[in-house]
Image: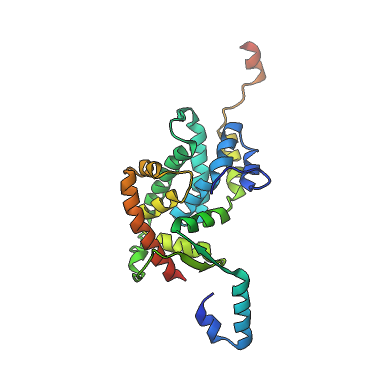
Amino acid sequence: MNQACAPTQCPEAAEAQLLPAELGALYAAHSRAIYYLALRFLGDSHKAEDATHDVFLKALRHLNQFRGEASARTWLYRIAINHCKNMRAAWHDRHVLPSSESEVFERLPGGDSPLRILETKELGGRIQKALDGLKAEYRLLLLLVSDQELSYDQAGALTGQTADAVRGKLFRARKAFADLFQKTG
Amino acid sequence: MKQHNKFSTGRHQEQTAESQTAHMGAREFQSVEDLLRHDAAQTAVPPEIARRLRQSIAQSAPPRRPWWRKLMG
C-alpha cells in the first residue's frame, strides 16, 4: 500500500501537483499513508484531515532538518505519531473518556485463523471499532507494520522499542484485533 | 449483513439478501495486516487537505518585497 502513483490513478497525486515542488513530491508519495494512520489512530475523519494537514505543513517548515538519514516515510510517520498523540492527549484532557472498549467486548477464542468476511460498506467501521478497542500501543503497531514500506526495525524505532519487542506485542495485538473484529460482525 | 435480519423477514427479502451477499462475495484475509492494507487502499485522501495546505502556505509566505526596495538593494 501507500506507493506513490500517477496523477491519473490517485487523486492525491493530482492535488500534489498544485503544491510547492518540495512538498508536492512528499505529499504524492506519502499522504495516503499518513492520512490512513491518522484516520485509524484517531478514529475521526475530521481530526485525521487536520492532523494530515498539520503534519505536511510541519514537514515543509522543517524540511532543512531532514537529512535523508531516515526514509522520508519514517520521518513523516515520526511527525504524525507525535502530532496524533498530542491531539489525543489534548482531547483526553477535555473529555472524560469511557473505559477501554476492550472491556466491553467479551473475549472470544481464536484469532489466528484467516479473517473471512463479507465486503460491505461497513468494513471500515468494523475495522475502526476493533482498533478502538485495542490499547493505543497495539493499534499504532498494527497500523505501522501494515505499511509494507516499514520494517519491524523501523516500527520499533518509531515506537521506542526493539524489533523483537515489536514482534512479541504484534502477536498479542493481532489476536486481540481478530477477537474484537469478530465481535463487530 | 446480519443474520437476524435475513431470517426475520419474508421470503422475498430473504432471497434479496442472499443475492446481495452472493454479489458482494466473501473475501478472506490471511492476516490483520492484509485487512488493514486493503482498508488503506480503499481509503481516499480528502482533496480538502491539499487545498488547505495551499492556503496555509500562501498565508505563511513572507511578504513580497516592494518594487522600490528591490531597486534600492
Viewer-side residue, A40 vs A158:
A158
Viewer-side residue, A49 vs A160:
A160
The residue depicted at 50 percent of the width and 32 percent of the height is A61
Q: Is residue B41 visible?
A: yes
Position above or below: A177 against A6: below
Give the color scheme: rainbow, by chain, secondary structure or one colour: rainbow
Q: Quadrant of the C terminus of chain B?
A: top right
The residue depicted at 50 percent of the width and 46 percent of the height is A34
Query: How many numbered marks have been drawn onto this rendered protein structure?
Result: 0
Residue that lies at the very extreme toward the top in this rendered image = B72
Q: Residue A6: name its quadrant.
A: top right
How far across and how far down the image is residue B31, in percent?
45, 59
A101 left or right of A29 in image? left
Residue that lies at the very extreme toward the right in this rendered image = A8
How far across and how far down the image is residue A147, in percent?
48, 48
Position above or below: B5 against A69: below
Viewer-side residue, A47 vs A176:
A176
Q: Is residue A135 visible?
A: no
The residue depicted at 44 percent of the width and 34 percent of the height is A70
How far across and how far down the image is residue B48, in percent?
60, 48
How far across and how far down the image is residue A154, in percent?
40, 41
Q: Quadrant of the N terminus of chain B?
A: bottom right
